[in-house]
Amino acid sequence: MVLIGGDYGMNEVIVNTIPAHEIKRRGLAAVDDLLDNGDVHVIRNNRPQYVVLTEERYQSLVAEAHEAYIARVRTSLREVKEGQVKTFATAEELLQALNEDE
């Protein structure tokens, strides 16, 4: 088990890991059994560097990202249609408005 924090944002626990040198030694067969338990985080230089996942999991993540994108676009179009957006004549006006919101 590896605990991630700091550079990676919120703390997160990774439970399915393998050292990179083990993959170098055994090849991809080293991750086959681990994939049964979910995504495999490859540790290199004592840090998570890569993630190995099944094609099915990858396609699921791609589909989820696409669905989220479509939902964001639909929300934006609805907000424009309902007049819930502000427009700015210049980038400077936009930056001023953003600074006022902080």
Image (tube, rainbow, N blue to C red):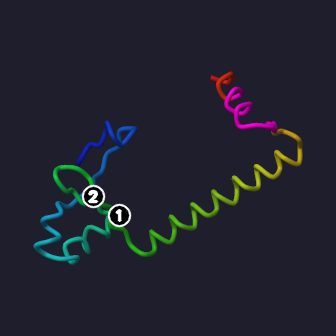
Secondary structure, mark 2, is: loop
Residue shown at the point (27%, 53%) measured from the top left: 15
Q: Is residue 94 magenta?
A: yes
63 left or right of 87?
left
Name which residue lies at 21% across and 56% down. 43
Residue at (26% x, 53% y) in the render: 48
Q: Where does label 1 land, which residue? A: 38
Q: Residue 99 is drawn in which quadrant?
A: top right
Quarter of the picture holding the C terminus: top right
Three-letter code for the amino acid on which mark 1 is drawn: Gly
Q: Is residue 93 above or below residue 67?
A: above
- Percent coordinates x, y for residue 3 in the rendering: 26, 43
| Residue 36 part of the magenta-drawn span | no
Within 10 angstroms of label 2, few (less than 14), some, or many (20 or more) residues?
Answer: some
Q: How many numbered callouts?
A: 2
Farthest residue to the left: give it: 25
Is residue 37 left or right of 99 when viewed as pictured? left
Q: Nearer the viewer, residue 96 or 66?
A: 96
Q: Residues within 10 Å of mark 1 (few under 14, many from 20)?
A: some
Q: What residue range appears in magenta?
A: 86-97
Q: Are marks 2 and 1 in contact (CB under 8 Å)?
A: yes
Residue at the disc numbered 2:
16
Q: Can you say whether 84 is above or below 1 in the image?
A: above
Image spot of residue 50 (x, y percent):
30, 60
